[in-house]
Amino acid sequence: MKHKSIIINIAILITGLLLGWLIFGGEESATHDHTSEAATEYTCSMHPQIRQQGPGKCPLCGMDLIPVSSAGGSSSNPFVHEMTPEAIALANIQTTKIKSVSATNELTLTGKIKVNEQQLSVVTANFPGRIEKLFVNFEGQEIRKGEKLATIYSPELVTAQRELLEAKKMSSISPQLYEAAKEKLRLWRISDKQIEQIESTGNVTTTLDVYADASGVVTKRQVALGDYVSTGSIMMEIANLSSVWVVLDAYESDLSWIKTGSTITFSVPSLPGRDFTATIQYINPVVNPETRSVDVRAVVPNTGNFLKPEMLVNATLQTKMNTKVTGLAIPATAVLWTGKRSIVYIKQKGSTPAFERREITLGARMKDMYLIENGLEEGEEVVSNGVFAVDASAQLSGNYSMMSAPETKSLEVPETFREQLTAVADTYFGVKNALVESNPLRAATAAKEVLKTLKGVDMKLLEGQAHDEWMALLKPMEQGATGISMKTDVEAQRKDFELLSDHLIEAVELFGLTSEKAYRAYCPMAFDDKGAYWLSEFEDIKNPYFGASMLRCGENREVFRKR
């Protein structure tokens, strides 16, 4: 009896184990670990730019490579770096929320008062001779228009007058010679009245007076009594100081704020408590190679002659940026530069602290901030303190950083072409959404629209490398769209969709879109775990390779932003 009960208990136990296996062990899990499917990537702790699949030695220092996962953050996106709260606190990493600001700026510029060269008169010798009398005794002497400046003795003048008198006697025989003799004197700025006086009196003048053509102050005197001068020699300069120039030094980074017609307010140390205003009339188109600055010139009335040339000036300029700038601004401390690229780190939403490396386009500098042309959105948080610590940690973890960035593939193309490519992407999204719903008929119809928009792209807008790249991408995109449009089996359509997606994503990388955002998503389980990419217009994952059976399988690997 006892033996029989033991057999019954064993049978019950075996039956329980069998039922447990059927209930819990035989059921296939519907979830997948995406990160475990990929091969482990290894990097060097001293040279994080070295990355390879599998262990090995660093080719630069010979150290053993370590898995990327053990070097730092565990995010599968190389643009995103995870950090522990302790590391963030230790590095004193702080973030600032991006917000719109008024695109106005106050520039402080320095410079000098200069002579208004448009009101500068140069006195030159009109004929050769010796200065017999000089009525300008010093620089700074005030002169009125018509005032006598000097008296010049000229042997050539005496000879020319005698030639005139002889030519007059023969004017009836050789009138051309007579006119030539008078013209010679006119070229020396001897008036017709003086010529008539010479002819009527028959007296030869040995000296001639030089008069001022304009009123002003003598700023330069380049002759002295008894000096010989030749025709065209500069004797002195007379400046009218009723208005003067304010010449300011503007750095290259300030030029985007400075426009002709803007009003500046300035003061001079020698006149405390007094402010002057002037209007910018000229911006030098050439940068001074020594000071890396540009001359900015304004004209100001000089009532009372208080402003003296070479006075130092402190000026302020209230200005506003043009409408092209979005109005978003970030602290200057948030920006890392490497060559032509500007890099910031954006705090990611979620329970695990993570920062996304992002390249942006900077606008003008506004005091201690930079305006943003594109690459950021209002409300995002940018690392404003400790950005170097985040970047260094990303390097050690093997993620992309300032010094180990992916090769940029962007090409400059006309905006019209970018708009046409955006139209192609919009029709592509129709195919993608149809495959998400596993609707082959709708996918085929949307693929025909893709073909239409591809034919509407004007390849003549592109030149050189851009044209060659587009032509290489166009054929496989047409092949993929054609395959989808001609098939009714959704699984067959998804294979053609991968071909279309891969080449459209490459086109977007090269040429860009005019839409604000597009996402490059990845599913590692597609096509028997080979993995496949697609382009999405929204951030939420909706898998076109599986549809409802694995709708959320995948992750966003990259964000394409408006250029």
Image (tube, rainbow, N blue to C red):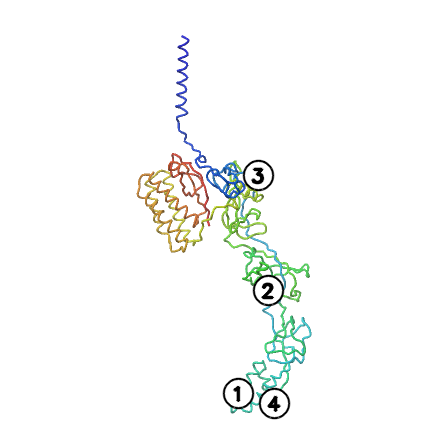
Q: Tell whether label 4 touches label 3 (CB within 8 Å).
A: no
In the rendered structure, which disc, 3 or 4, sits on the residue that comes first in sequence? 3
Residue type, numbered disc 2:
Val
Residue type, numbered disc 4:
Gly
Quick one: quadrant of the N terminus?
Answer: top left
The location of residue 358, given as percent across then percent down, is 50, 45
Q: In the displayed structure, would residue 9 be above or below residue 125?
A: above
- CA–CA distance between discs 3 and 4? 102 Å
The location of residue 528, given as percent across then percent down, is 38, 36
Residue type, numbered disc 1:
Leu
Q: Tell whether label 2 touches label 3 (CB within 8 Å).
A: no
Select label 1 or label 4 by which is in front: 1
Specify the label residue 202 is tagged with.
4
Specify the label residue 494 is tagged with.
none
Local crowd at mark 4 within 10 Å, few (<14), some, or many (≥20)? few
Residue type, numbered disc 3:
Ile
Give residue 530's quadrant in the image.
top left
Select label 4 or label 2 by which is in front: 4
- CA–CA distance between discs 1 and 4? 18 Å
- CA–CA distance between discs 3 and 2? 54 Å
In front here: 489 or 437?
A: 489
Where does label 1 land, which residue? 177
Where does label 2 land, which residue? 299
Measuring 40% from the left and 50% from the top, which residue is drawn there? 421
In the rendered structure, which disc, 4 or 2, sits on the residue that comes first in sequence? 4
Select label 3 or label 4 by which is in front: 3
Where does label 3 land, which residue? 88
Select label 2 or label 1 by which is in front: 1
Q: Tell whether label 3 touches label 1 (CB within 8 Å).
A: no
